[in-house]
Amino acid sequence: MPERVMEEKVAVVTGAGGGIGRAIAQAMAAAGARVIVNDVGGGLNGEGRSDTPGNETISLIRNAGGEAELCTDSVAEWGSAQKIVQAALDHYGRVDAVVNNAGILRDIIFHKMEPADWDAVIGVHLNGSFYVSRAAAPHFRQQGSGAYVHMTSTSGLIGNFGQANYSAAKLGIVGLSKSIALDMQRFGVRSNCIAPNAWSRMISSIPATTEAEKERVARLQRMTPDKNAPLAVFLASDLARDVTGQIFVSRNNEIFLMSHNRPLRGIQRSEGWSPELIAEHALPAMRANLQPLERSADVFGWDPV
């Protein structure tokens, strides 16, 4: 980044051992931040532990002249989440930004989803975002400043197949972020969400046999994890001092500001309602405003540009 907009600041980035988290950690360091790289080094489904991914991110940052330290504690438990924030205090004496990026996937169609699959995904994404955010809150409050950047997803904002656990967690994070923004605004603390997009294993199975298909895949492959990092750094920096409680989508070179839930249509009856009257009067009045059952690909129906 040309400007060191995070100079003298300390950023905690969870799930920074690879992908989007690594790209954000690198961008934070390039912008002048001292970074706590947090990653348990598990697989996509949350199993396993290794310090290798986190150390690889550390090496990339240090080789580029940045400062970073590793923390391998899990976000999914209150005690270990506190250690992540404490690592920032121990190494650098403060914490200025928290990026809640850690996550796992256990995709399966709803009627076959096991409670363990639900609990694991909710535990990392939603509980983890709360735990790490809550651990940083007293320090943000005391210093009168701080920024939270939470990773949500269009799977939660819009919808997707086979991701009830992930979608619920990601939409829950939106509610968490908005509540933090409201509760902590008076302390100079901001909280925003990003729904990031990047080329991944989940979309790498797209067929590419014709020239048109190969061209499309090539365009999707340009949607690299680092494309999401500038927005995260912006939201963590003082450049976004007046931005809080918002939801953004980052998609290659596109940035979208997403709407919040608001009433679409209302109808009132002084005598009250019965189920039959709702069917006879309320539903016809509202039918034109009923929302379609859509997935992310239906709303973002064009290739990233």
Image (cartoon, rainbow, N blue to C red):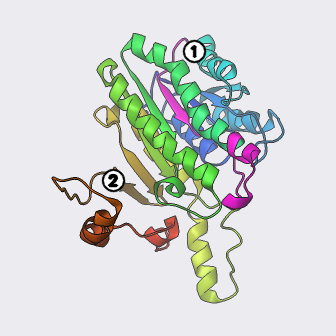
Mark 1 → mark 2, Cα distance in angstroms: 37 Å
Nearest the viewer among 12 and 117 is: 117
Residue 102 seen in the figure? no
**Kind of residue at disc 2:** Ser
Nearest the viewer among 30 and 75 is: 75
Position of the C terminus, as image quadrant, is bottom left
Nearest the viewer among 201 and 62 is: 201
Relative image position of residue 137 (x, y in whole percent): 47, 19
| Residue 85 among those drawn in magenta | no
Q: Residue at x 70, y 25 (%)?
A: 71
The residue wearing badge 1 is 92
**Kind of residue at disc 1:** Tyr
Position above or below: 8 against 253: above
Residue 258 seen in the figure? yes
Of the numbered discs in the image, which one, if any, rests on residue 14?
A: none
Position above or below: 231 against 227: above
Of the numbered discs in the image, which one, if any, rests on residue 259?
A: 2
Give whichever of discs 1 and 2 has the lower sequence position.
1
The answer to which image quadrant residue 275 occupies is bottom left
Nearest the viewer among 264 and 28 is: 264
* Camera-side mark, 1 or 2: 2
| Residue 114 among those drawn in magenta | yes
Label 2: state its secondary structure.
loop
Which span of residues is magenta-colored? 92-119
Relative image position of residue 273 (x, y in whole percent): 27, 56
